[in-house]
């Protein structure tokens, strides 16, 4: 019987290498097929496609917690990334037994037999692993087609320099969120945003006001898209901004995503506009998943309802 307490402290066991080799065979076909589909699409919007792919990857990681460390350890061409991740630590003993007893497939994986052979693999999380690794590789490829925007020297402290934005990075003219709030209410909103740590760069209430009026020619880097959506949905529900704010945000390209550190280390720092579709996906997720900072946002909305300008 396998010593489950010892396998993590020795070289990869042959049966686990068999899983890795089989996984590599499937992910290679998966990646090449997806790459071919994206490469031959005409009029492709890279920003929207990246957002869609990143949301797919997030969904897989959210629904399958043992896969969370895979992106951290994955490196193109590196062997045994599955072994060196935390995957085998995080799955149940029953799943581990199945992986340790896995027998290699009798045939080589090809595009013709891909689907049939994948169905034969009776391993928990295996299909999700194939899709996840394919997404990681496809995102890495597509990121090379996105214009790089340099970050400030001291990220999180210095305001983002709008002069680094390429001329065609933002559409013009921008649209307004049609804000209906007093100066004091705006200050309360800014205080809430700082408490939540919602934006990576330090911004002022005046800059936030310009953003809401459609007059801020800069990207606001968002640390948590779900919190952003919950906050702005709360503002819209209470009449502080227009209800169709998502279409405004998507059109203006007002917000950019902050990449996980593992992606920054591998691919460099790039800003990716948060699309309307991504924001809409977050709205759906907010209905079924917990959200950090809910109490802070709800208390802020209540305080805003009691405040008006003293002018």
Image (cartoon, rainbow, N blue to C red):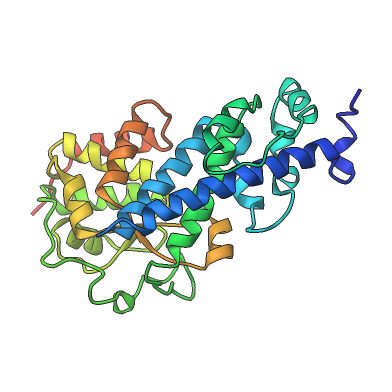
Q: What is the quadrant of the N terminus in the image?
A: top right
On the question of residue 306 being in view, the answer is no
Q: What is the quadrant of the C terminus in the image?
A: bottom left
Give the residue displayed 43% in from the left and 29% down from the top. 290
**Among all residues in the image, which is located at the extreme top?**
94
Give the residue displayed 53% in from the left and 54% down from the top. 137
Horizontally, residue 91 falls left or right of residue 192, namely right
State the image coordinates of residue 215 (x, y, percent, origin top left).
15, 65
Horizontally, residue 66 falls left or right of residue 104, namely left
| Pick the front one: 307 or 167 | 167
Residue 157 occupies quadrant: bottom left
Residue 279 versus residue 106 in the image, above or below: below
Give the residue displayed 37% in from the left and 38% down from the top. 296
Give the residue displayed 22% in from the left and 52% down from the top. 249
State the image coordinates of residue 287 (x, y, percent, origin top left).
33, 27
Horizontally, residue 5 falls left or right of residue 171, namely right
Residue 251 occupies quadrant: bottom left
| Pick the front one: 190 or 69 | 69
**Among all residues in the image, which is located at the extreme bottom?**
163
| Pick the front one: 138 or 252 | 138
Residue 226 versus residue 205 in the image, above or below: above
State the image coordinates of residue 216 (x, y, percent, origin top left).
20, 66
On the question of residue 175 being in view, the answer is yes
State the image coordinates of residue 190 (x, y, percent, origin top left).
29, 53
Residue 276 versus residue 92 in the image, above or below: below
């Amino acid at each position: 019987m396998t010593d489950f307490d010892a396998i993590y402290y020795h070289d990869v066991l042959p049966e686990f290498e068999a899983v890795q080799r089989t996984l590599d065979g499937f992910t290679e076909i998966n990646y090449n097929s997806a790459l071919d589909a994206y490469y031959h699409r005409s009029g492709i919007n890279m920003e929207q496609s990246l957002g869609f792919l990143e949301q797919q990857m997030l969904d897989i990681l959210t629904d399958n917690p043992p896969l969370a460390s895979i992106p951290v350890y994955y490196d193109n061409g590196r062997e045994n990334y599955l072994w060196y991740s935390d995957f085998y630590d995080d799955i149940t003993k029953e799943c581990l037994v199945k992986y340790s007893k896995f027998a290699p497939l009798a045939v080589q994986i090809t595009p013709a037999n891909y689907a049939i052979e994948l169905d034969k693999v009776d391993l928990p999380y295996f299909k999700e692993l194939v899709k996840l690794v394919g997404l990681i590789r496809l995102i890495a490829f597509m990121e090379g087609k996105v214009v790089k925007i340099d970050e400030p020297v001291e990220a999180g402290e210095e305001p983002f320099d709008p002069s680094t934005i390429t001329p065609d990075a933002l559409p013009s003219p921008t649209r307004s969120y049609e804000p209906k709030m007093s100066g004091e209410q705006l200050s309360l909103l800014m205080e809430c945003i700082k408490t939540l740590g919602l934006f990576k760069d330090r911004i002022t209430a005046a800059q936030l006001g310009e953003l809401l009026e459609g007059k801020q020619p800069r990207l606001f880097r968002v640390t948590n898209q779900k919190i952003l959506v919950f906050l702005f949905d709360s503002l819209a529900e209470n009449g502080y901004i227009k209800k169709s704010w998502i279409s405004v945000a998507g059109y203006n390209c007002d917000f950019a995503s902050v990449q996980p550190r593992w992606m920054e280390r591998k691919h460099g720092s790039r800003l990716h506009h948060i699309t309307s579709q991504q924001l809409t996906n977050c709205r759906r997720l907010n209905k079924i998943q917990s959200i950090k900072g809910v109490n802070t946002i709800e208390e802020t909305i209540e305080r805003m309802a009691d405040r008006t300008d003293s002018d």
